[in-house]
Image: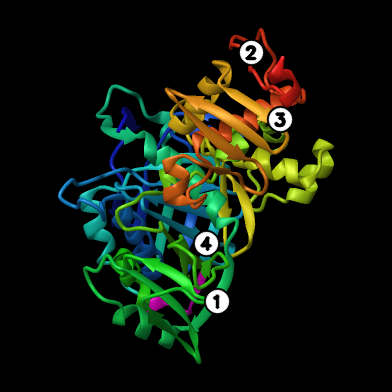
């Protein structure tokens, strides 16, 4: 597993400070892109949280996920959460160290009373003393919160600077890309009242990594060992334990997932708890031992050069909206909605797009990574381009032959594509296309003039028809 060391530099540690009339939650930020350009210590908000105890619990839940490895828990993780100012709301996001759980706390307009000072994305310091202090926030205590240093203009670098250096696994970034694509395919499957939500979540088995399937029965959810129409997959029920932080403030529980059949394999799902002025959502991967990074949901869009060109166009139109409207982008960019969605997937690979299942809408954020890194570090996509550039793909209508090593694989491109390789036999498309299907798609697009042209720094692709192959 490859990773890089990422440095977070803060002017000081985040802290919960005693203030006149109300405690003050000072969340320190560490660099990021804002609507005014790059900023070393962005400021996004100053004001009050309208439900301070619930907000403290929600922040702790996001921090819990950032500090946890649900798979191989002996290897502790500690990655600072990401915060985005989206104009009328704040979004706090994190991924577990194992890459299998994504958490997001959306503090909505009703949850804040103050001034939104800017838009953008940055990391926020959540340290051990702050976590301990947040557990002491009471329900009747007013709580002032500042996201970003209030005195940055008069602070010099001669004083103490807090710096954290942490390994940032490549799969962490890939997870941000994959989860937003998977979530965009989810629908609301069940909604429980606060009482039923608490009863159901507290009854889930502890320290359990089995795959459960839950479906609505009356006013609650009933678990079963296998899938059925309308059911939602819950792989590793113990991975929802971060929700325990906020159950006493829950107003409702909503469960999201893709459509399944009695023969469906395990799939991802999202669990959203509605709070006063906020939403806390946990999205879990299809297997407790499997992160989101290998799901392959982004590969089809990454394999097209048109999506890359469209992504450049669409990115110029993004403006930190809390909701990215596909129809508006299609109109402004002069392309159809399907191309916009593919461009958004492409932008998601560099952390620039997220997806909110509650509003069934994308949102804009910016993570500090270059746009090409996700493609370079995706082994299937790298291998697919190498096969095409090496002249190993021969396409004949909806069939193809792909030479890989000493073996020739047979690919059918109809539907999502099939292949005779072991990867496809094992996953049958459930984790995205194999490298041979991807190579066939790339070769076919190049042959039709929709792909990378020879002379762009890569070898030309060889995509032949049956007649040409016979010559």
* Element class at badge 4: strand
Q: Which mark is residue 112?
A: 4
Of residues 207 and 121, the one nearer the viewer is 207
Pointer 3 or 2: first along the chain: 3
The quadrant of the picture occupied by the C terminus is: top right
From this viewpoint, is residue 345 visible? yes
Residue at 40% over, 77% down: 249
Is 254 in the magenta? yes
Q: Which residues are magenta?
A: 248-255
Q: Which residue is mark 2?
A: 460
Q: Which residue is mark 3?
A: 306
Check if mark 2's residue and mark 1's residue have beta carbons within 8 Å.
Answer: no
Q: Residues within 10 Å of mark 1 (few under 14, many from 20)?
A: some
In front of the other: label 2 or label 1? 2
Is 265 in the magenta? no
Q: Which residue is mark 1?
A: 230
Check if mark 3's residue and mark 2's residue have beta carbons within 8 Å.
Answer: no
């Amino acid at each position: 597993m490859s990773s890089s060391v990422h440095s977070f530099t803060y002017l000081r540690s985040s802290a919960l400070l005693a203030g006149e009339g109300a405690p003050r939650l000072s969340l320190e930020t560490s660099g990021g892109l804002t609507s005014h350009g790059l900023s070393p210590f962005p400021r996004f908000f100053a004001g009050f949280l309208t439900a301070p105890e619930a907000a403290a619990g929600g922040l702790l839940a996001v921090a819990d996920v950032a500090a946890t490895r649900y798979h191989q828990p002996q290897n502790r993780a500690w990655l600072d959460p990401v915060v985005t100012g989206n104009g009328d709301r704040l979004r706090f996001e994190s991924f577990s160290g194992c890459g299998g759980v994504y958490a997001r706390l959306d503090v909505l307009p009703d949850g804040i009373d103050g001034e939104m000072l800017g838009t953008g994305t940055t990391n926020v310091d959540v340290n051990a003393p702050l976590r301990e202090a947040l557990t002491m926030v009471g329900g009747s205590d007013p709580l002032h919160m500042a996201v970003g240093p209030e005195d940055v203009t008069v602070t010099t670098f001669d004083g103490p600077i807090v710096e954290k250096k942490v390994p940032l696994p490549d799969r962490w970034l890939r997870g941000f890309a994959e989860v937003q694509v998977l979530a965009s395919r989810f629908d609301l499957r069940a909604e429980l009242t606060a009482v039923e939500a608490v009863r159901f979540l507290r009854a889930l088995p502890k320290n359990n990594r089995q795959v459960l399937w839950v479906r609505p029965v009356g006013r609650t959810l009933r678990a079963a060992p296998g899938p059925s129409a309308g059911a939602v997959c819950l792989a590793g029920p113990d991975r929802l334990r971060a929700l325990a932080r906020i159950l006493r403030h829950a107003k409702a529980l909503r469960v999201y997932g893709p459509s399944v059949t009695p023969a469906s394999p395990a799939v991802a799902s999202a669990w959203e708890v509605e709070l006063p002025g906020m939403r806390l959502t946990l999205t879990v991967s299809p297997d407790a031992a499997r992160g989101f990074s290998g799901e392959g949901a982004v590969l089809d869009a990454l394999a097209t050069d048109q999506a890359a060109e469209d992504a450049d166009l669409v990115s110029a139109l993004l403006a930190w909206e809390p909701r990215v409207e596909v129809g508006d982008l299609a109109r402004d960019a002069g392309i159809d909605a399907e191309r916009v969605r593919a461009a958004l997937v492409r932008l998601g690979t560099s952390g620039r797009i997220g997806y909110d299942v509650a509003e069934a809408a994308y949102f804009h954020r910016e993570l500090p990574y270059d746009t090409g890194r996700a493609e370079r570090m995706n082994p299937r996509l790298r291998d697919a381009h190498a096969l095409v550039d090496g002249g190993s793909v021969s396409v004949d209508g909806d069939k193809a032959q792909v030479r890989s090593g000493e073996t020739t694989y047979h690919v059918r491109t109809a539907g999502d594509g099939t292949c005779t390789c072991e990867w496809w036999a094992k996953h049958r498309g459930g984790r995205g296309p194999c490298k041979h299907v991807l190579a066939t798609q790339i070769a076919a697009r190049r042959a039709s003039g929709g792909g990378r042209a020879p002379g762009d720094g890569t070898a030309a692709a060889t995509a032949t028809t049956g007649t040409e192959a016979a010559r």
